[in-house]
Image (cartoon, grey):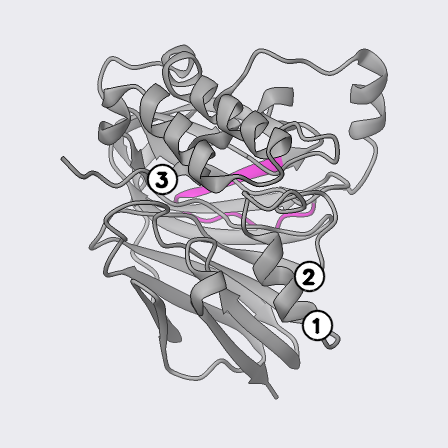
Amino acid sequence: MNRRVSPISLLACVITASLPATDHAAAHASHTPKFPPAGLGTVDIVARDYMFEMPARIPSGWTEFRLFNAGMAPHFALISLLPEGRTLADYGRDIGAAFGHALKAIAEDKGDRARAYAILGEQIAPWFAEVKQMGGPGFIEPGGLAITTAKLVPGTYVVECYIKTDDGRFHADLGMVRTLVVTQEDSGADEPLADARITLSNGKIEVAGGIARGKQIVAVDFDEHPEAGLGNDVHLVRLEKDGDLDAAIRWVDWMNLDGLTHHTPARFLGGTQEMPIGSTAYLTIDFEPGDYAWIAESGAASGMVHRFKVE
């Protein structure tokens, strides 16, 4: 039976490692969090190297996640709904170990994708099919603020970052993974109104409406996901020189040895992680004039990219 396996969304689940005290001290010295005034349903997250500072419990309903990157590496926050009765410990033990083994195989075999996917298929627990990726702020550069709004149902979630250190460890291995409980109480927030709209289907990023300079709210509709492999997502990258786009396409692929490392080849400014088909996320972005691209982890190498200019 075929089922969609989203390998990138669980890379960060091996949660047994810890940083030495000296690493923690160095990691916490960086950018100072700066958040605008909060409204209904706003949840602020500070990403450090390597930890999240965030509430443990939040209301359900429309939720504006504001992720400030106070670290010195790129970060993001994938938010996944666990099946009833499952815990963060289950998530790491039953699913994360397979990704750790797959990553080790990639390093040993210089990027052998076939072997890595075989390991994932053999070792991931069957209940992984019941985990629902529910979005969350995409890749954001150090000192940046990524704002993504999604509608959450009550339940227990995992929040994680799977960027890789230069020596091949995932940020969640080092502490960037948290449990988030979403309660029955509703946030009372309204669904945002969009200035432009993106539709994600297999192999395509379709954009309706132009992007103007200044604050824009961009809706992202999830229309399709591949039968197997990664789910569709989208991230914003600013292109400042020739070659930035090609390098960014390579960087977003975790199976490349230099993919999703601390050395980003261009400026990543947020986005949304995977969500179920039929869902909508809203991105709040302050656009400056320049060249940009929407880019998907799942299909960038096969053309799932949309380049545009803001005047």
Q: CA distance from mark 3 to mark 1?
A: 28 Å
- Label 3: state its secondary structure: loop
Image vertical order of residue 53 relative to residue 42, above or below: above
- Amino acid type shown at disc 3: Ser
SS under mark 1: loop
CB within 8 Å, label 3 to label 1: no
**For mark 3, does the 10 Å Cα neighbourhood hold few (<14), some (14 to 19), or many (20 or more) residues?**
many
- For the C terminus, the quadrant is bottom right
The residue where tag 2 is placed is: 267
Judged left or right of residue 222, residue 290 is: right
Q: CA distance from mark 2 to mark 3?
A: 25 Å
| Residue at the outermost bottom position | 311
Task: Say whether disc 2 or disc 1 marks the residue closer to the N-terminus.
Answer: 1
Q: Nearer the viewer, residue 44 or 188?
A: 44
Residue range highlighted in magenta = 34-46
In the rendered image, residue 45, in percent from the top left (x then y), is placed at: 56, 37
Point 74% across, 38% down: residue? 71
Name the residue located 81 percent from the left edge and 12 percent from the top edge.
Answer: 21
> Where's the N terminus, which quadrant?
top left
Frontmost residue, 82 versus 10: 10
| SS class, disc 2 | strand
Residue 229 is one of the magenta-drawn residues: no
Residue matched to label 1: 243
Mark with earlier residue (3, 1): 3
- Residue wearing tag 3: 6
Question: How many residues crowd mark 2 within 10 Å: few (<14), some (14–19), many (20+)?
Answer: many
Q: Is residue 44 magenta?
A: yes
Q: Residue at horizontal 18%, vertical 39%?
A: 2
* SS majority, magenta: loop
Front one among 3 and 170: 3
